[in-house]
């Protein structure tokens, strides 16, 4: 095996570059094995659940490909003393599937709850499954064109990075323990804080003399990890949005309306009788929604040249891809007749199953929009990466189109709104899945995987993740309440507001326009509008503490150079991913304990989590805030210590 392989390198052949996989097509090591499928499915479910909790809380999700690959190598190679690079690639393929499907689900499907609909687990399963399958199936014919013929032009940053991690692991370079360190620390911290109630979760201060300005921080591992992964700039932008909302706009509303008896729509009581949280809920949230909408639109407009170019190249390459990529092991896709047959079944499900209720027109929009955005996204993520993919903008476009069509047809009742959200959910999930499978197939192409087996693995991962998606969503709703300060679900709330506004005319358009104007002005200043608007839209307790992780990332970049910097950056990424996963998974476990009935010591009926709780820190004074801040400081110091003790390339 090569000593230090860089998979971004290729073998020159004339004017182009030929992709040379790490494992040649002539070799066929173990790949699609039972242990890889089981491990990948479990990791996919775990990271899917964690991403659901994270996305509903912050409006952000993280990729699971590299953490899944690292965990796979630790288990297969470290514990079981077996496993090939292709098995590890299969595990990360299935693992990242669950995370991507969860992102599409939590960004859209909770909108149905906000519209007052009842959701069954079976209905959520069907929406997740159909959207996920459309994203996979519509991307498969493009694989040969995008991964092989366009190899020189499309870097696929996340896919290439994951391939390099897999090869480094094959050569003994990756230290998986950092993921597990983060998992343990994040889980224990969340259990002590939110399970046993040993210290206060959200220290906060309200300044009544400053017209109800307020500041609070949820000092949790999940937000520390997110801050590290998004980096100091995005973290600072989100903090700025939160500070504008809670230190400027809320006091401004109170200054203007705090002495009047007038009820300002959409409020239900005079502003003088409102708390800071009430002003945020009735007014600031809509300003934030307008900012998020314009931020998504600007992201899409900025990407428009890439969108047009991607569409043109992808459609022109589609016919060539239809002919297949050859009979080499590394070029075998699922046969197109199979892809077509499964696609027909999925479309028939959308059209005929009563759980969808979108009719012929809705099915047509869902299929056409999914196909177009999948084709565009599959190439776009090759250029700019999955993290820069304007999913919100594309989903809003599909949702507005559907809402306008349904409104023109007279379907403006509750069933029409539900149908519009369902179409948007299917399209959003398809977009998320197509970006994921594109990166996974690029990883596979670089390490020498068999595309057909990866594609089957993606389908298995989608099926497994879809089964658990509804259960996780309903569990979190029962325990915390979707739309609450704990799980604000910003994207889904925006989707519900847009549908309600277009089809029911029930939106405060002035506040939305104000938010759109703020987002546009911020963009003119060179600040990305979308993260700024998300900070404006979220509770300050969620948007503010992300900055601490960003500051840790800033310290790493400023105090480390060269190979040490890259090594520490990788350590921080793995440790931060572990913090997020550990905190989120413990949050789901606590949600389970919250809904399990239990008889308390005084004979009263309660839940198991009430029995586990040892203190009531929320009722304490300043000392509780000091304790929370001190313990979070220890958590930050532990992260810094873990990262900076890295002395060699990981």
Image (tube, grey):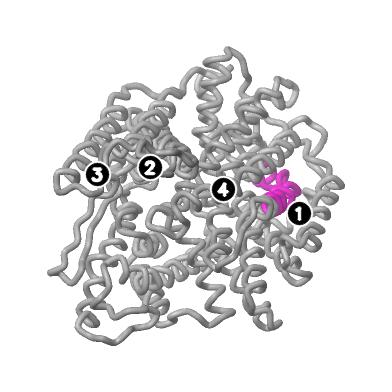
User: Disc 4 to disc 3, how far (Cα)?
Assistant: 33 Å
Above or below, 19 against 302 in this view is: above
Q: Earlier in the sequence, mark 4 or mark 2?
A: 4
- Image coordinates of residue 648 in percent, x first then y, are 35, 22
> Quick check: 399 left or right of 195?
right
Identify the residue at the far top of this view. Answer: 81
Q: Earlier in the sequence, mark 1 or mark 2?
A: 2
Residue topped by disc 2:
222
Residue topped by disc 3:
617
User: Disc 1 to disc 4, how far (Cα)?
Assistant: 28 Å
Give the position of the C terminus as an image quadrant. top left
Q: Earlier in the sequence, mark 4 or mark 3?
A: 4
Q: Earlier in the sequence, mark 1 or mark 4?
A: 4
Quadrant of the rendered structure where residue 167 is? Answer: top right
Residue topped by disc 1:
318
Element carrying mark 4: helix
Residue topped by disc 4:
102
């Amino acid at each position: 095996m090569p000593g230090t392989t860089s998979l971004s390198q290729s073998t020159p052949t004339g004017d182009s570059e030929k992709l040379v996989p790490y494992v040649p097509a002539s070799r066929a090591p173990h790949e699609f094995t039972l242990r890889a499928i089981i491990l990948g499915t479990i990791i996919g479910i775990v990271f899917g659940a964690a991403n659901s909790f994270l996305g509903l809380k912050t409006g952000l999700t993280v990729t699971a490909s590299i953490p899944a690959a690292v965990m796979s190598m630790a288990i297969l190679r470290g514990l079981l003393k077996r496993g090939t690079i292709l098995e590890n690639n299969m595990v990360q393929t299935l693992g990242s599937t669950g995370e991507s499907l969860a992102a599409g689900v939590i960004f859209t499907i909770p909108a149905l709850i906000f519209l007052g609909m009842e959701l069954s687990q079976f209905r959520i399963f069907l929406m997740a499954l159909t959207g996920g399958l459309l994203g996979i199936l519509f991307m498969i014919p493009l694989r040969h064109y995008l991964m092989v013929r366009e190899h020189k032009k499309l870097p696929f940053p996340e896919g290439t990075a994951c391939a390099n991690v897999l090869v480094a692991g094959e050569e003994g370079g990756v230290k998986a323990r950092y993921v597990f360190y983060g998992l343990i620390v994040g889980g224990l911290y969340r259990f002590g804080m939110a399970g046993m109630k040993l210290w206060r979760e959200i220290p906060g201060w309200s300044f009544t003399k400053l017209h109800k300005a307020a500041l609070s921080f949820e000092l949790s591992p999940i937000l520390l990890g997110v801050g590290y992964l998004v980096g100091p700039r995005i973290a600072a932008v989100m903090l700025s949005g939160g500070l504008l909302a809670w230190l400027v706009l809320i006091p401004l509303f109170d200054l203007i309306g705090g002495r009047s008896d007038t009820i300002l729509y959409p409020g239900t009581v005079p502003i003088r009788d409102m708390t800071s949280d009430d002003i945020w809920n009735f007014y600031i949230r809509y300003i934030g929604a307008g900012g998020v909408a314009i931020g998504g639109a600007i992201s899409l407009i900025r990407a428009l040249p890439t969108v047009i170019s991607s569409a043109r190249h992808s459609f022109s390459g589609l016919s060539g891809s239809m002919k297949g990529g050859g009979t080499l092991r590394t070029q075998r896709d699922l046969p197109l007749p199979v892809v077509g047959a499964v696609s027909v079944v999925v479309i028939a499900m959308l059209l005929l199953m009563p759980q969808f209720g979108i009719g012929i027109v809705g099915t047509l929009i869902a299929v056409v929009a999914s196909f177009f955005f999948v084709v565009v996204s599959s190439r776009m993520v090759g250029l700019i990466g999955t993290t820069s993919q304007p999913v919100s903008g594309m989903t809003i476009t599909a949702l507005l189109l559907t809402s306008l069509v349904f409104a023109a047809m007279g379907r403006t009742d509750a069933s029409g709104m539900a149908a519009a959200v369902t179409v948007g959910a299917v399209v959003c999930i398809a977009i998320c899945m197509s970006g994921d499978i594109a990166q996974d197939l690029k990883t596979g192409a670089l390490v020498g995987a068999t595309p057909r087996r990866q594609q089957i693995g993606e389908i298995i991962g989608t099926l497994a993740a879809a089964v658990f998606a509804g259960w996780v969503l309903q569990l979190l709703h029962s325990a915390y309440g979707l739309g609450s300060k704990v799980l604000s679900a910003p994207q889904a709330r925006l989707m519900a507001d847009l549908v309600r506004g277009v089809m029911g005319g029930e939106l405060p358009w002035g506040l939305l326009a104000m938010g759109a104007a703020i987002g546009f002005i911020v963009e003119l200043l060179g600040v990305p509008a979308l993260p700024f608007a998300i900070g404006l839209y979220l509770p300050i307790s969620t948007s503010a503490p992300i900055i601490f992780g960003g500051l840790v990332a800033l310290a790493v970049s400023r105090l480390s150079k060269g190979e040490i910097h890259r090594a520490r950056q990788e350590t921080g990424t793995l440790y931060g991913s572990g913090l997020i996963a550990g905190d989120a998974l413990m949050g789901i476990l606590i949600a389970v304990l919250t809904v399990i009935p239990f008889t308390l010591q005084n004979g009263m009926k309660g839940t198991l989590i009430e029995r586990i709780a040892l203190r009531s820190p929320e009722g304490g004074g300043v000392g509780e805030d000091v304790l929370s801040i001190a313990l979070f400081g220890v958590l930050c110091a532990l992260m810094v210590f873990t990262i900076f003790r890295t002395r060699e390339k990981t």
